[in-house]
Image: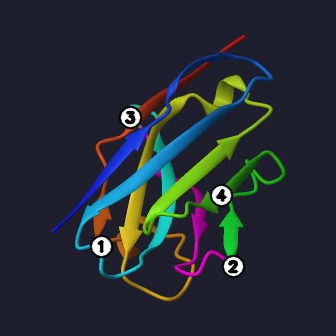
Amino acid sequence: QVQLIESGGGLVQVGGSLRLSCAAAGRTSSSFAMGWFRQIPGLEREFVSAISRSGNRQYHADSVKGRFSLSRGNVANMVYLQMDSLQPEDTAVYYCAAVDGSLVYTEAHEYDFWGQGTQVTVSS
């Protein structure tokens, strides 16, 4: 079993930045492709960003392109989501996800493991 542990959420003003971290614990002998999704209460979970197992490919939703970026840490299965120029519409619970695959995955159903979520609130 794999446990994903997110951190870094919080309250930030419009135009500010936050960095979310996600660490995968458990079956760490494999390197996972990882992604971030977000959800507003009452709405479906929305894709944000994803990165390949190797870290050399990443993909972002149009709504965050140019503002969000992903990087992988030196520790296996550690990923960071850097969020800049945050806007009120970025307010949501952000979830980290992982899958044992070699591609970049943008659909929630493609992921096998999920974190508990971390709240991001952008105040205007």
SS category of the residue bearing label 3: loop
Q: Quadrant of the N terminus?
A: bottom left
Vertical side of 85 occupied by 51: above or below: below
What residue is at 62 percent from the left and 75 percent from the top? 55
Q: Secondary structure at mark 4?
A: strand
The quarter of the displayed image where residue 52 is located? bottom right
Residue at the image point whose x is 66% and y is 30% from the top: 89
Question: What is the spatial separation of the Cα atoms under label 3 and label 1, in whole angstroms?
Answer: 34 Å
Q: Earlier in the sequence, mark 2 or mark 3?
A: 3
Q: Which residues are magenta?
A: 43-55
Instruction: Pick the quarter of the image with the C terminus.
Output: top right
Q: Residues within 10 Å of mark 4 (few under 14, many from 20)?
A: many
4 vs 1, front mark: 1
In this image, 21 relative to 87: left or right? Answer: left
Residue found farthest to the front: 74
Tags 2 and 4 touching, CB below 8 Å:
no
Residue that mark 1 sits on: 28
Mark 2 or mark 1, earlier in chain: 1
Extreme residue in the top direction: 124
| Residue 73 is at least partly visible in this image | yes
Q: Earlier in the sequence, mark 3 or mark 1?
A: 1
Sequence-first disc among 4 and 1: 1
Q: Residue at image x 76%, y 56%?
A: 62
For mark 3, does the 10 Å Cα neighbourhood hold few (<14), some (14 to 19), or many (20 or more) residues?
few
Task: Let me know if residue 44 appears in the view.
Answer: no
> 43 or 52: nearer the eye?
52
Tag 2 secondary structure: loop
Residue at the disc numbered 4: 70
